[in-house]
Amino acid sequence: MLRKRCNQFFQRQYMLVATAAISLTIAITARPAKSAVVALSDDNSIVAFDPDKSDNPANNGLIFWTVDDVNQLFQNQFWYRIGSQGRENSLNTLNLIRLEQSQPADKQLSVAYAGTGFEVTLDLTLDGGALGSGSSNLFENIRIKNTGSEQLDFHLFNYTDFDLNENGQQDTIKIGSNKAQQFDTFTWATEVIDPVASYYQVSPFSKILEALEDDAPTTLNNFSGPLTGENSYAFQWDFKLDQEKSFSIKNYKSIKPVPEPTIIPGLIVFGSLMWLWRSRQALRRSTNS
Ligand SMILES: [Ca+2]
Ligand SMILES: [Ca+2]
Ligand SMILES: [Ca+2]
């Protein structure tokens, strides 16, 4: 069983480091964060990405996403398997061959990894909302290219663990082949993917993470929820990739506040009651006269 509390401690440390690094970067308007953890920032949002190998499988890829200083994401990472046998591995077990961060905005990141006979490029773009809006968008574009001489039987997994408002216990998740939605009382997270996934799954933490880290081949079980509690979800794409060919997937994640209950239905009820009261008054007057 993978533990989360310990990771949350590290996450907070990363947040401090990343925030400090961003402040420093802005102050000297020179270079991106020099930490192993790369931070992206835009308006009300900060995202941190750890590209390197880590002993803890819950501690790489995207490791937090703060919106107006509140963290909404515990982890987002990709795993892959080639063929129908053997285990999955996370992207960060591959050789990191490129890491480029846009300047001066620091809101874009492009990371490339090389495996045996293939390359993976991951482009991230953060689009934060206005300060105090509680809204933020994250675009992930992942491309797998066959650089070898054989066809590849590729299986790609996009794993996401939102813990909305820093606590996943009251979060509810629903997932399908092209979309996942997660919400609590205050916040709504949506992920839309293109092309649609071959398989998908929502499960209590850390079931999916353990399946992606064990030694057996995994196929997600298409359980769509809704499921409430400390959960995570994943999408799986199965595809054959010929020599020199590429396969691209777009993932669009957004975070928004749950809309305030609108005042209009209340006004309608009040209006109807007033109408009823006036009608009764009129009726009474006409009866009395
Ligand atoms: Ca969660
Ligand atoms: Ca929550
Ligand atoms: Ca597995």
Image (cartoon, helix red, strand yellow):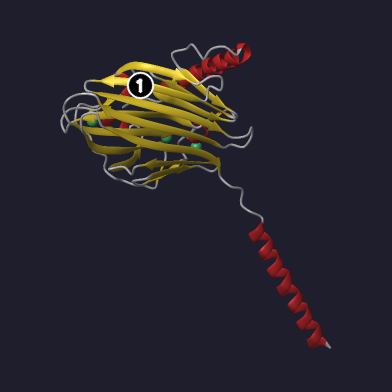
Whole-percent x, y for residue 74 in the image: 44, 29
Describe residue 243's horizontal placement relative to residue 64 as left or right: left
Tag 1's secondary structure?
A: strand
Which residue is denoted by mark 1 in the rendering?
Answer: 112
Whether label 1 lies within 8 Å of ligand 3 gets the answer no
Describe residue 24's horizontal placement relative to residue 5 as left or right: right
Whole-percent x, y for residue 4 in the image: 40, 26
Residue 26 in view: yes
Could you tell me how many numbered marks the image carries? 1
Whole-percent x, y for residue 169 in the image: 45, 37
The C terminus - image quarter: bottom right
Residue 232 in view: no
Q: Residue at x 49, y 38 (%)?
A: 254
Residue 258's quadrant in the figure?
top right
Residue 1's quadrant in the figure?
top left
Whole-percent x, y for residue 259 in the image: 58, 47
Q: Which residue lies furthest to the front in this view?
A: 244
Quadrant observed for ligand 1 in the rendered image: top left
- Viewer-side residue, 101 vs 184: 101
Task: From this view, report whether residue 8 is shown above or below residue 171.
Answer: above
> Callout 1, which amino acid?
Ala
Task: From this view, report whether residue 178 is shown above or below residue 40.
Answer: below
- Mark 1: few, some, or many residues within 10 Å (few <14, many ≥20)? many
Describe residue 187's horizontal placement relative to residue 287 as left or right: left
Task: From this view, report whether residue 145 is shown above or below residue 175.
Answer: above
Q: Which residue lies furthest to the right in this view?
A: 289
